[in-house]
Image (cartoon, helix red, strand yellow):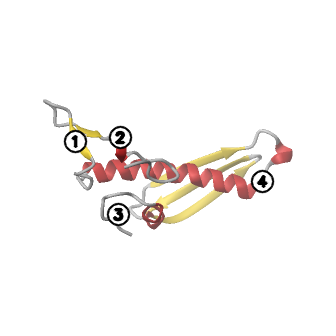
Amino acid sequence: MALTPDGRITPEHLESLIVDETYDVIDTTTRVSLKLANGFRVHGESACMVPANFDEAKGRELARARAVAKIWELEGYHQMAKGAHAGAFGSVKGSSAPVMHAGARWSPDGPIGG
């Protein structure tokens, strides 16, 4: 899935990058390894402090959300590095380093603002 016409990364785009996922549960800790289309792996983890409250499904959900948040950050960097967000970035006067404008922020739950 491509980026939106205005260059935003969508949850659907991130999901399209994931080709495999594996989970490990040790005691009350859940770990996920998400394999991306290019072979890179991103990991997420969740842990429950009270064993009586442990819910494996919730642990998987939280661990996966944390791993996807990492993909979001990596994909944002990747898109910026290849110039896909030319309209969202400027530069510091006297420097070629790009600067992200306030409207071009991300979060694990989706784009914020802009």
The residue depicted at 75 percent of the width and 43 percent of the height is: 48
Q: Name the image quarter holding residue 101.
A: top left
CB-based contact (under 8 Å), mark 1 and mark 4: no
The residues tagged by marks 2 and 1 sit, at their Cα atoms, a distance apart of: 11 Å
Vertical arrangement, residue 28 with respect to residue 37, above or below:
above
Q: Which element is circle 1 on?
A: strand
Tell whether 53 sits left or right of 41.
right
Q: Judge the density around disc 3: few (<14), some (14-19), many (≥20) Cα neighbours within 10 Å.
A: some
Q: Which element is circle 2 on?
A: helix
Residue annotated with mark 4: 55
The residue depicted at 62 percent of the width and 46 percent of the height is: 45
Q: Name the image quarter holding residue 92.
A: top left
Instruction: Compare marks 2 and 3 and give the one earlier in the sequence.
Output: 3
Q: Judge the density around disc 1: few (<14), some (14-19), many (≥20) Cα neighbours within 10 Å.
A: some
Q: Quadrant of the N terminus?
A: bottom left
The amino acid on which the numbered mark 4 sits, given as a three-letter code, is: Asp
The residues tagged by marks 1 and 3 sit, at their Cα atoms, a distance apart of: 20 Å
Residue annotated with mark 1: 90
The residues tagged by marks 2 and 3 sit, at their Cα atoms, a distance apart of: 19 Å
Tell whether 100 sits left or right of 34.
left
Residue annotated with mark 3: 3
